[in-house]
C-alpha cells in the first residue's frame, strides 16, 4: 500500500513538519487541528465556541479533500487546555456525530500550538 499525502487548501497549512492527513488504503489519519482560519492565517479564538467551530471546519475540509466525511470517523482525540471547557466542546463536537459516534478520548494538556484551547485529531475508515 502506498502512502498518499492529503492537502486541502480549505484547511490551514501545517505549522511544522507534518501533513494535514495521510491516506493508506482505506484509512485516513488526520493530524490534530487547531482553530487556525485558513483564509486569514489567524486563530479564531474569541471563545471556546469559536475555536471548536473552526477546528471542526478544518477537519471537515481535510476529510472532504480525501473523499471522506464525519460518518467515516472511527476514532478521535480531543486535547483541551482547560477541562472546564469539556461540556461546550462536547456539545459542538456532538453535532457532527449524531449517529454512531467514534471512539474517543479527551485529555487536558498544559499547552497547545498557537496557545489554542482545543485541538482535535481523527482517524477515518471507508469500508
Image (cartoon, rainbow, N blue to C red):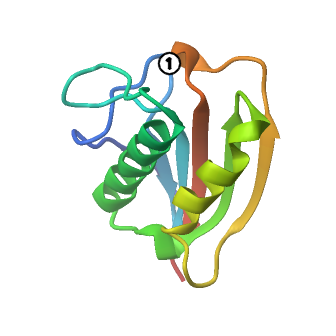
- Left or right position of 110 against 67: right
Q: Quadrant of the C terminus?
A: bottom right
Q: Is residue 125 visible?
A: no
Measured as percent of width and height from the top left, residue 74 is found at 64, 69
Residue drawn at x 59%, y 36% is 119
Q: Position of residue 90 (x, y in %)?
A: 64, 57
Q: Can residue 116 be seen in the rendering of this structure?
A: yes
Give the left or right position of residue 40, taking residue 3 as reference: left
Residue 56 against residue 55 in the figure, above or below: below
Q: Which residue is mark 1?
A: 17
Left or right of residue 110, residue 61 in this image:
left
| Residue pictured at 41% horizontal, 39% vertical | 50
Residue located 52% across and 58% down the image: 92
Taking depth in this image into account, of 70 and 2 the one nearest to the observer is 70
Rate crowding at label 1 as few (under 14), some (14 to 19) or many (20 or more) other CA atoms within 10 Å.
Answer: few
* Image quadrant assignment for residue 120: top right
What number of labels is visible? 1
Check disc 1 and report its element: helix, strand or loop.
loop
Instruction: Residue at 23% x, 42% y: name it.
Output: 10
Q: Is residue 45 above or below residue 2?
A: above
Question: Horizontal and vertical percent for residue 26?
Answer: 52, 69
Amino acid at each position: 500500500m502506498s502512502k498518499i499525502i492529503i492537502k486541502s487548501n480549505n484547511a490551514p497549512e501545517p505549522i511544522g513538519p507534518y501533513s494535514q492527513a495521510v491516506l493508506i488504503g482505506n484509512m485516513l489519519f488526520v493530524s490534530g487541528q487547531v482553530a487556525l482560519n485558513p483564509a486569514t492565517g489567524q486563530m479564531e479564538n474569541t471563545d471556546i465556541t469559536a475555536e471548536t467551530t473552526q477546528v471542526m471546519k478544518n477537519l471537515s475540509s481535510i476529510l472532504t479533500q480525501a473523499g471522506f466525511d464525519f460518518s467515516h470517523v472511527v476514532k478521535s482525540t480531543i486535547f483541551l487546555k482547560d477541562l472546564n471547557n469539556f461540556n461546550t466542546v462536547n456539545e459542538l463536537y456532538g453535532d457532527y456525530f449524531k449517529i454512531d459516534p467514534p471512539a474517543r478520548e479527551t485529555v487536558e494538556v498544559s499547552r497547545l500550538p498557537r496557545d489554542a484551547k482545543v485541538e482535535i485529531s481523527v482517524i477515518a475508515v471507508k469500508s
